[in-house]
Image (spheres, helix red, strand yellow):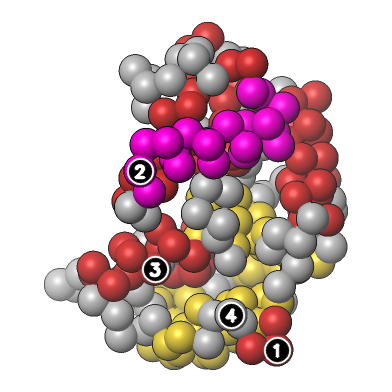
Amino acid sequence: MAINNTVIKLEKITKTYKTSEIAVKVLKGITLTIKKGDFIAITGRSGSGKSTLMNIIGLLDTPSGGKYYLNNTDVTTFSEDELAYFRNKEIGFVFQSFNLLPRATILENVSLPAIYAGLNKKEREQKGKKHLEEVGLIEYIKSRPNQLSGGQQQRVAIARSLMNEPSLILADEPTGNLDTKSGDDIMKLLKKLNEQGKTILLITHEKDIANRAKKIITLKDGVII
């Protein structure tokens, strides 16, 4: 359990990509604290470093320097296997492109993270149904993703992100592929989940979407401005 309600703590995080000829500094000393129940939007222009920062927070990439504490555990020195375990346990992902398995049913898609968590089929289905009910899609459990609208598919992705009761929901441009009304519905759903105590970190380049969060952090050239 997070001490002092701190879920994420970044201390002077840097990221440099090196090729044989050149080193590109993408993040230049990011210090950031995310507490339980926060709803934070990270915004910035293309090339500002927000995707790199999201990948580091989501344990999809490792920093070049600095410290990263997730629920007071220093994950900076974790192995690939440790990162994968922690990622599945602590972080629920919502991506712009939904990332649903086309041949699996909606219930199977939602239940997927619980397979890696070791839950049996009955437990997985019970939890999956509970989360589909939360996002208003319980009647679609036997449908396939292509039978749903974009907004409904994103709701499925949100239900999937909740499966392992994560410490953090990481939403990367969650409205990017949606029309205005569907995007509005998704933001209302994220707000509702936040009001229920979920901690949400939203990555977006859209100002009106960022304004729906409780707090906005703007990146420019790899630093918080």
Residue 4, position as x, y percentages in the image:
70, 89
Mark 1 burial class by Cα count in 10 Å: few <14, some 14-19, many 20+: few
SS under mark 1? helix
Q: Is residue 176 visible?
A: no
Taking the spot 57% from the left edge, 25% from the top edge, the residue there is: 153
Residue type marked 1: Asn
The tag earlier along the polypeptide, 3 or 1, is 1
Look at discs 2 and 1 and give the one toward the viewer: 2
Towards the viewer: 209 or 110: 110
Q: Is residue 66 left or right of residue 81?
A: right
**What residue sits right under mark 1 in the picture?**
4
The tag earlier along the polypeptide, 2 or 3, is 3
Residue 186, disc: none
Judge whether residue 82 is colored magenta: no
The tag earlier along the polypeptide, 2 or 1, is 1
Taking the spot 37% from the left edge, 55% from the top edge, the residue there is: 117
Distance (Cα) linking label 2 and label 3: 20 Å
SS under mark 3? helix
Q: Is residue 145 visible?
A: yes
**What residue sits right under mark 3 in the picture?**
86
- For the magenta stretch, what is the residue range? 119-138
* Tag 2 and tag 3, C-beta contact below 8 Å: no
Q: Quadrant of residue 157?
A: top right
Position of the C terminus, as image quadrant, is bottom right
The tag earlier along the polypeptide, 4 or 3, is 4
Distance (Cα) linking label 2 and label 4: 25 Å
Residue 152, position as x, y percentages in the image:
63, 23
